[in-house]
Image (cartoon, rainbow, N blue to C red):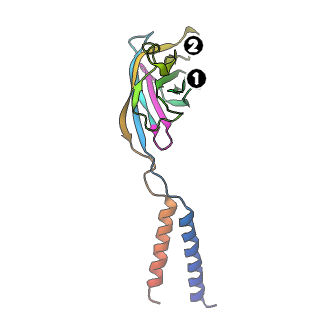
Amino acid sequence: MNSAKRFWTIEAGTTLVFAALLLIARPARADSFESFSATGSFLNEPNLSLSGGFIVDETTGQVASVNLFHGPTELNILGMTGAPSVLPDAFLIQAFNQLGDELALLFAAPGNQGSLAGYTGGVVCSDTTVSIVPACGNFASAFTPHQSPAMGTDDVFIGEITDVGSSPSPTAEQSTLTLVGLGLVALLVAGRRLPS
């Protein structure tokens, strides 16, 4: 077999392999992220505010990141999230920091089934709402400090979750494999059109 024929046989085989990869490879999906802010005040230290927020991946309905504050104390490590089994119409986000402080943010999210996809905001379960918002049961959101958990928690006195809009998606571009494959196919087609 001469070298020109061998080259074209290898090229045809390579084209078939990349065509198969293009059919198998799933294109990357562009996830949609929604940002929420949390505002309110705490009961035991009334000069401290609840602030910050969290981001939800609308594709999966799961919390992607958290950055909440108990006054000046930042809590940006995401813990457990989801609907507590005893409160199916509420959603819990646990946020921590490196010191071990914890904020258990519980809020009304009727019918969430463990997902915040489509959630638009609402009331934070707090000392003010425990008796008037059935979704909260008799539970309130609370901050627990790492240095003195025996001294108790600082309950949220009143609070609200507000949808502040879409966040930029970190995966908005096409799949790298698809782009490389298309580029190679284009090079092969262009190579066949070159005069010998």
Up/down of 8 relative to 29, above or below: below
- Residue sitting nearer the eye, 113 or 4: 113
The N terminus - image quarter: bottom right
Q: Is residue 49 visible?
A: no
- Residue sitting nearer the eye, 76 or 130: 130
Label 1 Cα crowd, 10 Å radius (few <14 / some 14-19 / many 20+): few
Taken as a whole, is the magenta stretch helix, strand or loop? strand
Q: Residue at x 53, y 58 (%)?
A: 26
Residue span colored magenta: 56-74
Q: Position of residue 195 (x, y in %)?
A: 44, 89
Q: Position of residue 118 (x, y in %)?
A: 43, 38
Instruction: Tell me which amino acid carries mark 2.
Output: Pro
Q: CA distance from mark 1 to mark 2?
A: 24 Å
Instruction: Tell me which amino acid carries mark 1.
Output: Val
Q: Which residue is mark 2?
A: 149
Q: Position of residue 68 (x, y in %)?
A: 44, 26
Q: Which residue is mark 1?
A: 86
